[in-house]
Structure formats: structure tokens, C-alpha cells
Image (spheres, helix red, strand yellow):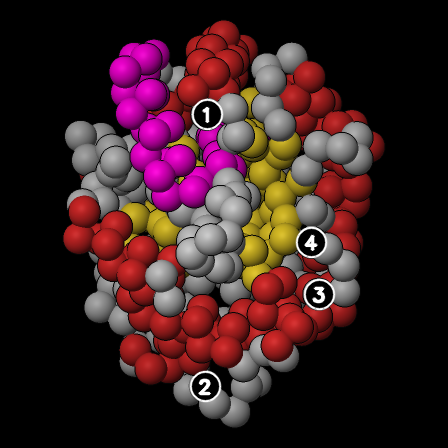
């Protein structure tokens, strides 16, 4: 099975006068339409847009070791082409079989983007209304569950915090919190989603508004349905084993305290290990390993931690595709795990692949041999 994405450049955050916003850190990459789409989608201009295909595979540590029970606590990100278009049953059946083969049972399926006017959109570049495609979304969820009964399907909702006509920041709005909470309730109660994935960007260190947003969603959907959050990487960690980045402002990262607060608030965190600005492969490997060590060592509860790893082109100042490769990222994850105490190694749930091309068998084999069969 194949997956295609194109990633946007990350928008450079503007300086804020409000202390709660802190310092901006890296956000999840902006994604585009399939290759037939308008080329202007390759650049982000600050307008939220629905996200198309992202492929992500999340595989638990040791899941494929001989004699052990097969688990499906693994995941893949799906774009609007799955949830907005009428995918035929044969394709869904084939896809479900591929996921089972690779022990994938967690789907992050794109649901909607919150527009600047507070409207939930469904089309490209903020066009269309979610309500126009609501039936198609519910139809996809239902049909996929019939073919992969072990799957848990999360509604992936995208929220740009810096889209406010007044001061350029809107995550402090209680009306926004209520809107997101109500929409999340609709998705799980009426459309059949099993959980919510919050993709909020850009995110800032010590941003209390984000914590409050997670709590609002929790109150709306209950404690039984999981909440996952996309977590930006530290661009300028102080680890002595990493190459300093003079082009990035020092402190462009979350504090240890804030990392803990986010992990306590969510059921699952997905670490975004790309757009690192790293230009050396070994440095990038160590940078990924740093994040694995840092988050696992800070983990105080049973929050699941997944590491997103890149497999895409589109070079930019932030992303060197010859450095940020799937192979190097997997090496970084494995190195990070090796540095953990023996009792902590199993606390990493797995990895997630982001790809800009259809994964062929050689790529799947690389993934399986490097990660599943290590």
C-alpha cells in the first residue's frame, strides 16, 4: 500500500507580547494535495487548509518478536482523500489487509481544519464546510471498522493558533475551546470516531491555553475515549552531543516541566522528528535519540509515546531529505532506546512514518528489517 504527501514549510512564528505564548517551537509540517494539485500548495501562506495524505506507521516495540502476541496499537495518518471521497470497498479491504499485515490498528484520519472564522472546513485551503461531507466521513469510519475490527480511528483535527484577525493569536479564546470541544463530541458520538488527535500549531513553551484546550476536549468526550496530541520537536536542545544551530534562537524548545504537563494531560503524544534544520546525518540521528531519551525519562504515567519519522523530499532550510531519512530516523530511535534503563525500554510505543511517495516493497522491507525485526 502506498502513501503520498507533500509537506509545507513551517510558518515562522511572530513575536508575541503575551507571556503565556512563550517561545515558538517547531510545528508539524504543512501538507498538500496530491501531485495533481495546484503547485501553490507547496508553500504555506498562513491560511489553514485540510491535510491530505500522510502515511504513518506506528509499531510497538518487540511486537513482531517470535512467539509474542500480535498487537495493533500502531497507527497511520490518513488524508481527506480517504474521508472525503467515496473510496471503493475493494480498496478499503486491500488497505485494511495491509495494515493488519504491518500490525497497524490506530488510524489518524483527517476530519477538519478550524478556519479563521471559526467554521470547520473540509476542502482544500479552507474551502467547503465539514457539514457538507459529514456523511462521507461517517461512511468511511463505518466501512473501515467492518474490515479491521481491531482498529481505533482517531479524528485528526487541525487548529492554527496564529489565525486571529485582531492580534494574531486565538488559542486563548474560550469560544474556540468550546467550539473544539463541541466538535470533538460530535465526531465521537455521532460519526463513530474512537478518539481525537489534536494538531495545534504553532505551539509555544509553557502555553497554558493548550493545556486548557486538552482539558476542554476531555470534558466533552469523556475519559474513556483517548486524546492524542502532535508534539513539536526541540530545535535547540542543550545536549552537548548535538551540533549547535546558530541560525535558530536559543531556547526554541519546550521545558521539561511543560513536556510533563502535556504528557499528563494527553493519552498519547506523537513526537514530530523532522524539519530539524540538521545538516549532518550523525547529528540528526543523535537529535532523534535525544528526544526518545528525554520524553521517556520524563514520562511519569502511562501516556503512550510515538515517534514520527520522515520519508519525504521537498528540501527546505528546515528539511534536508538526504539527512532526514527513514533509515537515519530509525537508527536514532533505536539509539535512544538503547540509552534507556532496561525497565524503560518498553515504554516507547512505536514509530510513525511520514512519506511523500508510495511505499514500495523495498521500503516496507527496510522498515520491517530495521525496526520490527531488530
Residue 242, labelled with which disc? 2
Tell me which segment is drawn in magenta.
Answer: 86-115
Please name the residue that numbered disc 3 is placed on. 299
Residue under the image location 45 percent in, 86 percent down: 242
Is 196 a magenta residue?
A: no
- Distance CA(mark 2)–CA(mark 3): 22 Å
Image x and y of residue 52, in percent: 36, 33
- Specify which label sits upstream in the sequence, 3 or 1: 1
Image x and y of residue 120, in percent: 56, 22
Residue at the bottom extreme of this rendering:
240
Image x and y of residue 214, in percent: 73, 42
Q: Is residue 314 above or below residue 182?
A: below
| 35 left or right, relative to 272 | left
Element class at badge 3: loop
Does the residue at mark 3 contact the one at mark 1 (Cβ under 8 Å)?
no
Q: Nearer the viewer, residue 221 or 171?
A: 221
Does residue 257 appear anywhere in the picture?
Answer: yes
Q: Residues within 10 Å of mark 4 (few under 14, many from 20)?
A: many
The C terminus, quarter of image: bottom left
- Specify which label sits upstream in the sequence, 2 or 3: 2
Image x and y of residue 136, in percent: 44, 11
Q: Is residue 355 above or below residue 19?
A: above
Does the residue at mark 3 contact the one at mark 4 (Cβ under 8 Å)?
yes
Is 92 a magenta residue?
A: yes
Residue under the image location 74 percent in, 41 percent down: 213
- Distance CA(mark 4)–CA(mark 2): 27 Å
Amino acid at each position: 500500500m502506498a502513501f503520498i504527501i507533500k509537506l509545507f514549510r513551517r510558518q515562522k512564528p511572530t513575536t508575541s507580547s503575551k507571556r503565556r505564548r512563550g517561545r515558538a517551537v517547531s510545528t508539524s509540517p504543512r501538507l498538500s494535495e496530491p501531485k495533481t494539485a495546484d503547485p501553490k500548495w507547496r508553500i504555506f501562506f498562513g491560511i489553514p487548509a485540510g491535510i491530505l495524505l500522510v502515511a504513518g506507521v506506528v509499531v510497538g516495540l518487540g511486537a513482531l518478536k517470535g512467539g509474542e502476541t500480535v498487537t495493533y496499537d500502531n497507527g497511520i495518518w490518513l488524508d481527506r482523500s480517504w474521508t472525503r471521497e467515496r473510496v471503493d470497498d475493494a480498496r478499503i479491504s486491500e488497505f485494511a489487509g495491509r495494515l493488519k499485515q504491518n500490525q497497524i490498528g490506530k488510524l489518524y484520519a483527517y476530519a477538519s481544519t478550524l478556519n479563521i472564522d471559526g467554521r470547520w472546513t473540509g476542502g482544500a485551503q479552507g474551502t467547503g464546510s465539514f457539514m457538507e461531507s459529514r456523511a462521507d466521513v461517517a461512511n468511511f469510519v463505518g466501512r473501515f471498522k467492518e474490515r479491521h475490527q481491531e482498529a481505533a480511528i482517531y479524528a485528526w483535527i487541525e487548529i492554527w493558533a496564529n489565525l486571529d484577525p485582531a492580534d494574531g493569536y486565538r488559542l486563548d479564546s474560550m469560544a474556540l475551546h468550546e467550539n473544539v470541544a463541541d466538535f470533538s463530541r460530535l465526531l465521537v458520538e455521532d460519526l463513530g470516531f474512537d478518539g481525537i488527535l489534536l494538531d495545534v500549531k504553532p505551539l509555544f513553551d509553557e502555553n497554558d491555553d493548550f493545556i486548557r484546550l486538552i482539558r476542554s476536549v476531555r470534558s466533552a468526550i469523556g475519559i474513556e475515549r483517548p486524546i492524542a496530541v502532535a508534539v513539536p520537536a526541540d530545535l535547540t536542545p542543550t545536549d552537548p552531543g548535538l551540533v549547535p544551530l546558530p541560525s535558530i534562537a536559543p531556547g526554541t524548545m519546550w521545558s521539561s516541566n511543560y513536556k510533563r504537563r502535556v504528557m499528563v494531560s494527553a493519552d498519547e503524544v506523537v513526537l514530530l522528528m523532522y524539519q530539524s534544520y540538521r545538516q549532518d546525518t550523525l547529528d540528526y540521528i543523535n537529535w532523534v535519540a535525544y528526544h526518545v531519551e528525554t520524553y521517556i525519562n520524563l514520562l511519569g504515567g502511562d501516556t503512550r509515546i510515538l515517534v514520527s519519522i520522515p520519508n519525504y523530499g521537498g528540501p527546505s532550510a528546515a528539511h534536508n531529505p538526504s539527512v532526514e531519512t527513514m533509515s537515519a530516523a530509525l537508527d536514532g530511535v533505536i539509539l535512544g532506546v538503547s540509552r534507556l534503563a532496561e525497565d524503560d525500554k518498553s515504554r516507547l510505543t512505536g514509530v510513525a512514518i511520514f512519506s511523500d511517495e508510495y511505499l514500495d516493497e523495498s521500503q516496507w522491507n527496510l522498515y520491517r528489517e530495521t525496526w520490527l525485526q531488530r
